[in-house]
Every structure is written in structure tokens, then in C-alpha cells.
């Protein structure tokens, strides 16, 4: 179970710069946020600390009152308590609804900020280093943030599915029909990925092969 934030950690996150997510605090406080996946240390001097997508989501959750009569969705987490996009086919997916929509929107905005802070030219129109090392999650976040619906747990249930491939820098995206597949490809291209449609030789199943654009 993820440990709740301390009062001091909540204050640090809430006091982050609203535009850049830049944090101010002691080295120990900032290091603790990094370990929890809520902040990252910029690789270039002066090595300031900034909120990660999960940190942006935590700040939004802290500043936004619960809507009356709205059941609160469980916090989607990965192994380190970091936001997890739906890749399609999860046995126990996060609950849908307004809360999930806010979480996805906040995570995507945080990802764009991470691109701006870590890409050498501050570009937000192509994936950053984190996305290149988390291909499936990064592609799934781009799709979910654009409004595409992920597949359910049952085989054949409509929706996209993002999967690893033997290629170290590419993912495969499957969709229930040609129109949905084309829509996924267009979304990924708009999010800074190179995407093309292919056919599996054995099954004749169509899919999108996508990789992060570098320039």
C-alpha cells in the first residue's frame, strides 16, 4: 500500500510553481518526493526539482474538492505509486468516470511539462527520455488522454490494446476495426510518435506499429 503524503510533502507539492511544477525545499524533502515518483531532478545545472506527471496529479487532487455524491475512483498505481495509463485488457482496470478523466488529463499535462523540461530544445511535440523507456505506458497515456477507449479484460471486448514488440523502440497497438485503428495511429502521430499500419503474417490481423519520434 502506498504511504500517504506527510503534511510537509503536501505543502511542497501545493507550493510548486503552477506553470513549470518547479519545487522548493530541503534536499532531504526533495529526495523523498523523487523516491516516491512525484518529482524528478533536472539533469542540467542548477539541477532544480520539478513535479512528475504523478506529482501534478497529486497536486490537482489536493486542490480539488470532491464532487458531491460522486464515488471516488481508486488511485491507479504502478509499482511505485505512479499514475498508470490503461493499456487495454487489464483484469481490474481503474474505475471510469469524472475522477478518472481528471487523473488522465492531469497526467498528460504533466507529461507535456516533463517533455518541456527534459528535451534539450524544450520541445513538447515529441516524446522525452522517460517515454522512450516506458513505451507501452507512454503510448497508452497518449491514447487515453485523447479519448480512445481501452479494451476490457474479456478477449474480443472493444477498445485499444497496447503491447510490447520484439523491437526495443516500438509498441504494437490493436483496435477493434479499421476506423479505430486509423484513429489510434493519427493520435499517436499527433503526440509525437511515428506510426504505420501493418498486417501480422500468420493471423492477418491489422495493427499499428509506433515508435517515439526523435526529431
Image (tube, rainbow, N blue to C red):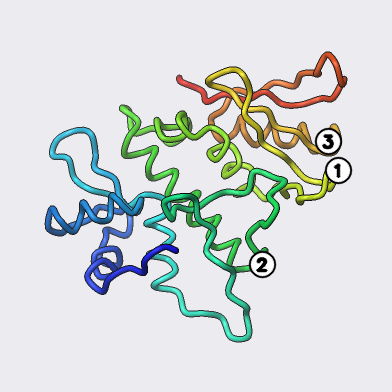
Assign a secondary structure to mark 2.
loop
Per the rendering, the mark at residue 59 is none
Mark in the foreground, 1 or 2 = 1
Query: CA gap, disc 1 to disc 2?
Result: 23 Å
Q: Circles 3 and 2: CB distance less than 8 Å? A: no
Q: Secondary structure at mark 3?
A: helix
Residue 1 falls left or right of residue 181: left
| Residue sticking out furthest to the top | 201
Q: Residue furthest front?
A: 1
- Label ID, residue 156: 1
Residue visible at 53% across and 32% down in the picture: 135
**Other-residue count near label 2 (Cα within 10 Å), few / some / many at <14 / 14–19 / ≥20:** few
Q: Is residue 22 left or right of residue 55?
A: left
In primary-sequence order, the first of circles 1 and 2 is 2
Task: Sort mark 1 into few (<14), some (14-19) or many (20+) by Cα contacts within 10 Å.
Answer: few
Q: Which residue is mark 2?
A: 97
Examine the image and state in which quarter residue 159 appears: top right
Q: Quadrant of the N terminus?
A: bottom left
Residue at point 52% right, 25% down?
212
The foreground one among 174 and 189 is 174
Cβ atoms under marks 1 and 2 closer than 8 Å: no
Residue ID for mark 3:
179
Nearest-to-viewer mark from 3 and 1: 1
Q: Quadrant of the C terminus?
A: top left
- The front one of 87 and 108 is 87
Q: Which label lies toward us, 3 or 2?
A: 2
Of residues 45 and 28, the one drawn nearer to the viewer in this rendering: 28
Amino acid at each position: 500500500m502506498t504511504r500517504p503524503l506527510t503534511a510537509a510533502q503536501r505543502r511542497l507539492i501545493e507550493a510548486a510553481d503552477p506553470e513549470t511544477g518547479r519545487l522548493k525545499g530541503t534536499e532531504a524533502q526533495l529526495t523523498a518526493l523523487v523516491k516516491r515518483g512525484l518529482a524528478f531532478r533536472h539533469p542540467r545545472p542548477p539541477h532544480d526539482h520539478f513535479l512528475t506527471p504523478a506529482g501534478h496529479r497529486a497536486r490537482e487532487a489536493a486542490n480539488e474538492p470532491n464532487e458531491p455524491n460522486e464515488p471516488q475512483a481508486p488511485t491507479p498505481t504502478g509499482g511505485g505509486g505512479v499514475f498508470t495509463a490503461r493499456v487495454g485488457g487489464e483484469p481490474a482496470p481503474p474505475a471510469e468516470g469524472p475522477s478518472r478523466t481528471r487523473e488522465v488529463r492531469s497526467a498528460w499535462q504533466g507529461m507535456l511539462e516533463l517533455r518541456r523540461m527534459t528535451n534539450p530544445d524544450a520541445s513538447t511535440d515529441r516524446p522525452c527520455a522517460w517515454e522512450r523507456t516506458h513505451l507501452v505506458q507512454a503510448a497508452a497515456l497518449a491514447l487515453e488522454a485523447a479519448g480512445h477507449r481501452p479494451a476490457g479484460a474479456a478477449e474480443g471486448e472493444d477498445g485499444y490494446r497496447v503491447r510490447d514488440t520484439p523491437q526495443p523502440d516500438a509498441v504494437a497497438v490493436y483496435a477493434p476495426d479499421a476506423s479505430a485503428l486509423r484513429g489510434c495511429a493519427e493520435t499517436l502521430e499527433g503526440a509525437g510518435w511515428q506510426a504505420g499500419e501493418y498486417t501480422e503474417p500468420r493471423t492477418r490481423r491489422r495493427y499499428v506499429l509506433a515508435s517515439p519520434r526523435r526529431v
